[in-house]
Image (cartoon, helix red, strand yellow):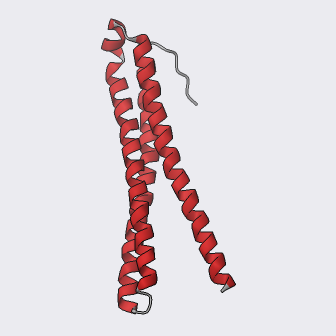
Amino acid sequence: MAEDQERANSANSLVTLAQGAMKAWMIINGACAVAILAFVGQVWSDKFVSAALPSAKYAILLFTLGVGVAGLSTVMAYFVQLYYHLLIEVQFDPNKAWHTWHKGEMVRYFAIGLVVTSIVLFGLGVYQSLTMLRDYGVSVQTG
């Protein structure tokens, strides 16, 4: 019994960490989109519109998609928990247990893929933001 409780505590800790990571990527992507909007609001001019606005639009789009994908990953995390809860109910029927576990694992990997996608969208958004700054005439040094 003590070993089962230890496993349950460990699983709950992992779930808490995963939920924190999902929320963090939503906040990071959202904050970047807001920062780009604030920058655009401050430097709006004919020069900016012709030179850097296309890159700014793509950066905002990428960050916004990153927020949406991270948000979807939190929904998928709910379904993962649901499948694992259902697994407890069908544990004495090996066939149902295997199918329930398999579905839960597929949803879990999908949720992980969504978080990775959110991270990739963040990276692409940063690249577009740097492109926007360069197009506007700001000296951007990388590496």
The outermost residue toward the right is 2
* Residue at x-position 42% and y-position 11%: 43
- In the rendered image, the vertical position of residue 34 relative to residue 121, given as above or below: above
Q: Quadrant of residue 37?
A: top left
* Residue at x-position 46% and y-position 44%: 26
Q: Quadrant of residue 15?
A: bottom right
Q: Position of residue 107 (x, y in %)?
A: 38, 66
Is there any visible trace of residue 130 in the rendered image?
Answer: no
* Residue at x-position 45% and y-position 68%: 81
Is there any visible trace of residue 90 in the rendered image?
Answer: yes
Q: Quadrant of the C terminus?
A: top right
Q: Quadrant of the N terminus?
A: bottom right
Q: Position of residue 101 (x, y in %)?
A: 41, 78
**In the image shown, does 126 or 91 lie closer to the viewer?**
91
Q: Position of residue 16 (x, y in %)?
A: 57, 59
Q: Quadrant of residue 97?
A: bottom left
| Side (left or right) of 10 relative to 44 | right
**In the image shown, does 120 or 91 lie closer to the viewer?**
91
The outermost residue toward the top is 46
Q: Position of residue 129 (x, y in %)?
A: 44, 27
**In the image shown, does 46 or 20 lie closer to the viewer?**
20
* Residue at x-position 45% and y-position 36%: 30
- In the rendered image, the vertical position of residue 80 relative to residue 34, given as above or below: below
**Count of marks placed on residues:** 0
